[in-house]
């Protein structure tokens, strides 16, 4: 019997946890699989191993493990596969099929563009950040595609682990001629990072510029569409 294991990152805040839980609960009716389980890489419960154990108890012999992440970086390439390998050692008869993050998708670019106000003359695209060079390149590609679509400048920056930082990018924006800046968090869910962004933006507000903070993309229905397609493809393999 097959099961779907949704692997979210995890959050230090209840709001972030609730957003992830709501996202998966809203999605499960779209997939005709009786066993569907949410788990987290870190910070929240159940863990990946506990999620797998829950699936096995319900009768699963094949688990389709899908990372609910935007881009492939260390979590998707190393941390999650390591946890899945440990589970495989514990349950050698279990078949595990591993999916992939959403990646660079034209439909995600379209969804991001919906947050840009008509009067905006600059966009600040803010990523979580990673030391993984491929992830950085993919994030830059997202920014480039968004700039092509909107035909206004897009600056990319990061909350951690890469340059330029969000703080540096905001400082540059205050020195620019831009009057209406849309700030788009390239994140899935609300949580501690969004709260930190809000505080940082408040410290830069001034009389000659307007900063508008968008929402994490996890609320957009296009992600359900992309997730459903990936799971259907993985089901064919299994």
Image (tube, grey):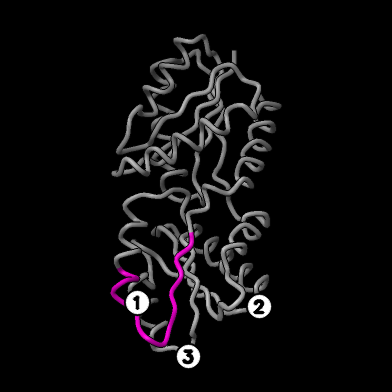
Looking at the picture, tell me which residue is in the foreground, 217 or 212.
Answer: 212
Which residues are the magenta region?
A: 200-214
Q: Position of residue 167 (x, y in %)?
A: 33, 73
Nearest to viewer (mark 1 / mark 3): 3
Q: Does the CB distance between marks 1 and 3 fall below 8 Å?
A: no
Residue at (56% x, 27% y) in the render: 64
SS at mark 2? loop
- Residue identifier under label 3: 177
Q: Which residue is mark 2?
A: 151
Residue appearing at x 31%, y 69% in the figure: 200
Q: Is residue 163 above or below residue 230?
A: below
- Between 175 and 205, the residue placed more toward the observer is 205
Q: Taking 170 as reference, is 41 above or below it?
A: above
Q: Nearer the viewer, mark 2 or mark 1?
A: 2
Q: Label 3 crowding class (10 Å Cα cut-off): few <14, some 14-19, many 20+?
A: few
Using the image, tell me which numbered label, if any, was put on residue 168: 1
Q: Earlier in the sequence, mark 2 or mark 3?
A: 2
Specify few, some or many for label 1: CA neighbours under 10 Å numbering under 14, 14-19, or 20 or more.
few
Q: Is residue 202 magenta?
A: yes
Quadrant of the image containing the C terminus: top right
Q: Is residue 106 above or below residue 165?
A: above
Tell me the quarter of the image containing the N terminus: top right
């Amino acid at each position: 019997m097959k099961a779907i294991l949704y692997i979210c990152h995890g959050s230090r805040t209840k709001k972030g946890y609730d957003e992830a839980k709501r996202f998966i609960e809203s999605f499960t009716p779209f997939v005709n699989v009786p066993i569907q389980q949410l788990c987290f890489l870190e910070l929240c419960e159940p863990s990946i191993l506990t999620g797998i154990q829950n699936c096995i108890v319900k009768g699963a012999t094949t688990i389709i493990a899908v990372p609910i992440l935007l881009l492939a970086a260390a979590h998707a390439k190393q941390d999650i596969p390591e946890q899945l390998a440990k589970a495989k050692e514990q349950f050698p008869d279990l078949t595990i099929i591993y999916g992939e993050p959403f990646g660079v998708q034209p439909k995600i670019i379209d969804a991001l563009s919906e947050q840009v106000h008509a009067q905006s003359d600059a966009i600040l695209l803010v990523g979580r950040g990673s030391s993984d060079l491929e992830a950085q390149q993919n994030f830059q590609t997202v920014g480039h595609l968004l700039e092509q679509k909107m035909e206004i400048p897009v600056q990319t920056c990061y909350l951690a682990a890469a340059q330029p930082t969000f703080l540096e990018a905001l400082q540059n924006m205050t020195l620019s001629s831009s009057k209406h800046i849309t700030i788009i968090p390239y994140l899935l869910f609300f949580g501690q990072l969004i709260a930190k962004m809000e505080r940082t933006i408040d410290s830069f507000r001034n009389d000659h510029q307007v900063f508008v903070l968008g929402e994490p993309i996890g609320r957009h229905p296009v992600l359900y569409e992309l997730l459903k397609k990936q799971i259907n493809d993985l089901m064919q393999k299994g």
